[in-house]
Amino acid sequence: MVPVTDEHVLSNPTADRVKKVASLASRAGRRKQGLFLAEGPQPVREALALWLRRWEEEPRGEKEETQGLPRLDALYFDPSALSRHTEVEALLDRVRGVLFDPEQDLPREARIFLREATPEVLRAMGDAETSQGIIAVCTIPQQAEELPQLRLGAALLGVQDPGNTGTIIRAADAAGADAVVLTPGSSDPWAPKVVRSAAGSHFHLPIRPGADLDPFLDAARGQGAQILAADGGGEAALPALEQPQNPTVWLFGNEAHGLSEEEKAAADQRVTIPLYGRAESLNVATAAAVCLYHSATAQNSGAAQNSGTAQHAEQ
């Protein structure tokens, strides 16, 4: 580990650098700087791992699997907090090994700012009620003109609660989705609470806020995807979907009002999740997890069966 001297420790909570990082808690600050906060061990771990995927091994730079994902810009840490998360500490040591290797010729975009900071500074920088002593600053990725190829996608139409938004992003990531799209009126996916709720998933799959619904659906259908609306009053029950293994984009609506009539009409089917107990309804994040996993299970089961059939034919 490269030693850090006292004069290189950030110790003034009112310093300009600290104020600039703290301003990323606001939408205006994020727009102005093109950056967002990733607080805590899980998001920081994934930010470091993504940096290593890009720069540790040849060929270095933007790889296909990292396109559309954030870039690590700076990392601030309290060593005592870092020592409690040995996996993050090990990743940071690997990053330092690449950054400070005199034989490495890294481009400007690979150079990141690493600085030890006092607990007071980290509390001033962060947005969380209880600082965890590790904060990454990352770039908000520019959106590609074209959608990635969608086998499974999630579209958030006016989902406004940051916790729900982050949980849906995390569920989509866990289900193997290729992208999460948010229409205007949804939560800012780069807000600190969303990033914390997603627990590192921002560094795994493309996230596209501010998308116009109709062009997005046209592009998804152009790739052969079916559009399914999660709707408590839908005509199709989730377990009875006829082709759940097909490429699918799910539409999830606002917590209070659900999907509008126009949004429901834009889907190929309106799908309801059967409720077997006495609950009136499901939280939108829970419903999203159920729907995404239903599709993912069907798609992956189908892929496994096709693979087994192909192997049997070869024999």
Image (spheres, rainbow, N blue to C red):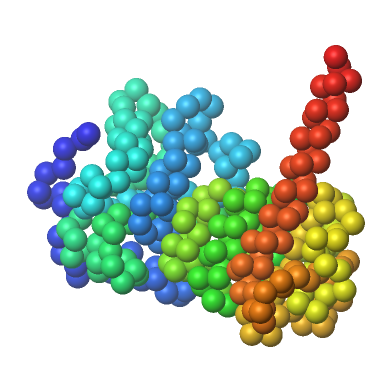
Q: Position of residue 298 (x, y in %)?
A: 78, 48
Q: Residue at x 45, y 75 (%)?
A: 28
Number of marks: 0
Q: Position of residue 133 (x, y in %)?
A: 26, 57
Asked where in the image residue 310 lies, by quadrant, the reply is top right
Q: Is residue 198 above or below residue 110?
A: below
Above/below status of 233 relative to 292: below
Q: Is residue 28 above or below residue 313?
A: below
Please state the horizontal and vertical placement of residue 29, each as a whole percent of the image.
Answer: 42, 71
Residue projecting furthest to the bottom: 257
Say whether residue 20 is visible.
no
- Give the side of residue 145 with respect to residue 83, left or right: right
Task: Residue at 79% x, 64% y: name it.
Answer: 238
Q: Is residue 21 left or right of residue 245?
A: left
Q: Which quarter of the rendered picture does the C terminus lie within? A: top right
Q: Is residue 120 visible?
A: yes
In the picture shown, does residue 9 fall above or below 284?
A: above
Quarter the N terminus occupies: top left
User: Which residue is at a point 49% across and 35% down the rendered structure image?
Assistant: 53
What residue sits 44% from the left and 30% below the top? 56
Residue ranking furthest to the front:
277
* Residue that protrudes farthest toward the top in the picture: 315
Query: Closer to the camera, 92 or 106?
Result: 92
